Image (cartoon, rainbow, N blue to C red):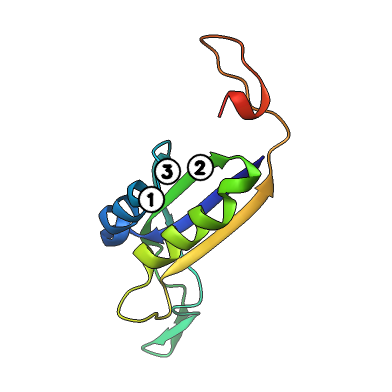
Amino acid sequence: MKLITAVIQEDMLDRVREELIAEEVYRITVTRVSGRGQQVGEEIYRGQRITPNLLPKVRIDIGVNEEWVERTIKAIIKGARANGGSVGDGKIFVTPLLECIRIRTGDRGGQAI
């Protein structure tokens, strides 16, 4: 099992959801977050160094079994890549998911996902 976490631009959420649905990935968690990547570092304004504001982003978390990892990643990339790809499109992190437990039934592991 893996936990796929993607941080994308807010306006790409609907496109990503459509691509995930097309790949039959329906179970997602979405959180509104703020952050900054490579877009801009420190800026100089009127001779003073300032740190730019954080940008609004969307974080998507999806728990999947091994056989769903690649198709989930491809769907996120397809939906989140703006105009052929540009700085700020986002990142995808894939981490091992040690355990998943469905609260309603107590199912564990891949069955709970």
113 versus 101 height, above or below:
below
- The answer for how far apart the CA atoms under marks 3 and 1 are is 5 Å
Quadrant in the rendering for residue 100: top right
The residue located at (60%, 24%) in the rendering is 111
Mark with earlier residue (3, 2)? 3
Residue contact at pointers 1 and 2, CB within 8 angstroms: yes
Give the residue pinned by disc 3.
Answer: 25
Question: Under tag 1, what secondary structure?
Answer: helix
- Disc 2 marks which amino acid? Ile
44 or 29: nearer the eye? 29
The residue located at (46%, 73%) in the rendering is 51
Give the residue pinned by disc 2.
Answer: 62
- Badge 2 crowding class, 10 Å Cα cut-off, few under 14, some 14 to 19, many 20 or more, is some
Quadrant where the C terminus lies?
top right
Residue contact at pointers 3 and 2, CB within 8 angstroms: yes
- The answer for how far apart the CA atoms under marks 3 and 2 are is 9 Å
Instruction: Name the front one of labels 3 and 2.
Output: 3
The residue located at (33%, 51%) in the rendering is 22
Q: Where is residue 6 in the image (x, y as percent from the top left)?
A: 49, 55
Mark with earlier residue (3, 1)? 1
Q: Where is residue 26 in the image (x, y as percent from the top left)?
A: 39, 38
Q: What numbered label is drawn on residue 20?
A: 1
Q: Where is residue 44 in the image (x, y as percent from the top left)?
A: 43, 87
58 or 95: nearer the eye? 95
- Disc 3 marks which amino acid? Val
Question: Under tag 2, what secondary structure?
Answer: strand
Quadrant in the rendering for residue 16: bottom left
In the rendered structure, the answer to whether residue 50 lies left or right of residue 97 reads: left
Residue contact at pointers 3 and 1, CB within 8 angstroms: yes
